[in-house]
Image (cartoon, rainbow, N blue to C red):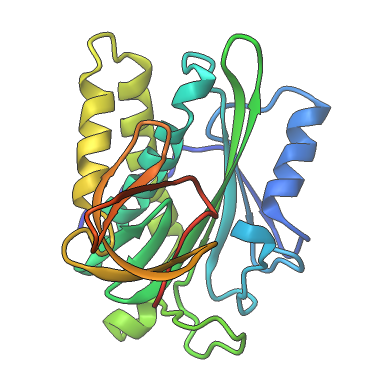
Amino acid sequence: MATIPFTFPLTTLDETDSTNRYLTHLCDQGNVAEYTIVRADYQTAGKGQRGNTWESERGKNLLFSFVLYPTFLEARRQFLLSQLTALAVKEALELWTDDIRIKWPNDIYWNEKKICGLLIENELSAEGIARSIIGIGLNVNQEIFHSDAPNPVSLRQITGLEENPMEILAHILTYTRWFYEGLRQDEDGAMASLIARQYHLSLFRREGWHPYEDATGRFIARLLRVEEDGRYILQDEAGKERGYLFKEVQYIL
């Protein structure tokens, strides 16, 4: 695996409540360059999906946020940002290990265990997406987890080696930039199609029948597709299609 130069603006903190919150404050105060990263050794209130916090032992993992200004994207296409970021993390991690999958909408799994979570906060304008702050928590060198999270795993637990978080960060941002700049110049829609296709092929439990739960209870279904707006389309055992937006259905793990 080739070492790549780190060319992105970076602020490193010993501790903060949330890198997303810190970077949002920076952006609100003045001009912050695209791809600027805020990384912390420890977060006291790391933000996760559904209002959860992200458990991380001090100095062991990769906790960071970065900013994009995707004004070229209409608000209705904001799921593309979730797709391309998840793909960038997946591509980077596959330099270290196999069996990396994206659990809809954008958690990153190794086999049946969660190695990474993403939180994307978009600021919309009349023209499109004015700003996107993307927070990532990636388990790198932590060996013992204390929270009640059902299935955490770290890269060190997978490889048996202590890994370099900054090297992983460089690869994640490099892949992100490749997808993102391709999307910026995507006059014929080829990059958007590539992202959507690769995202679908990378999905966790993409094939077969699996247990889910929605507001009506548990059921068995198989994945049909993910729509452009991020809607998750399942087919249950009775042959009925069921469509869900984020938080409306859960995997049974």
In the image, is residue 134 above or below residue 64?
above
In the rendered image, residue 182, in percent from the top left (x then y), is placed at 30, 23
Q: Residue at x 64, y 67 (%)?
A: 41
Please name whichever residue, 130 or 242, is drawn nearer the observer in this view of the structure. 242
In the rendered image, residue 175, in percent from the top left (x then y), is placed at 32, 41
Please name whichever residue, 211 or 93, is drawn nearer the observer in this view of the structure. 211
Tell me, yes or no, if residue 35 can be seen here.
yes
In the image, is residue 129 above or below residue 220?
above
Q: Residue at x 30, y 81 (%)?
A: 158
Q: Quadrant of residue 83?
A: top left
Q: Quick one: which residue is furthest to the front in this view?
A: 238
Tell me, yes or no, if residue 47 can be seen here.
no
Please name whichever residue, 81 or 65, is drawn nearer the observer in this view of the structure. 81
Q: Quadrant of the N terminus?
A: bottom left
Please name whichever residue, 1 or 55, is drawn nearer the observer in this view of the structure. 55
In the image, is residue 118 above or below residue 208?
above
In the rendered image, residue 153, in percent from the top left (x then y), is placed at 41, 79
Q: Quadrant of the C terminus?
A: bottom left
In the image, is residue 87 above or below residue 146?
above
Q: Quadrant of residue 187?
A: top left
In the rendered image, residue 8, in percent from the top left (x then y), is placed at 50, 38
Q: How many marks?
A: 0
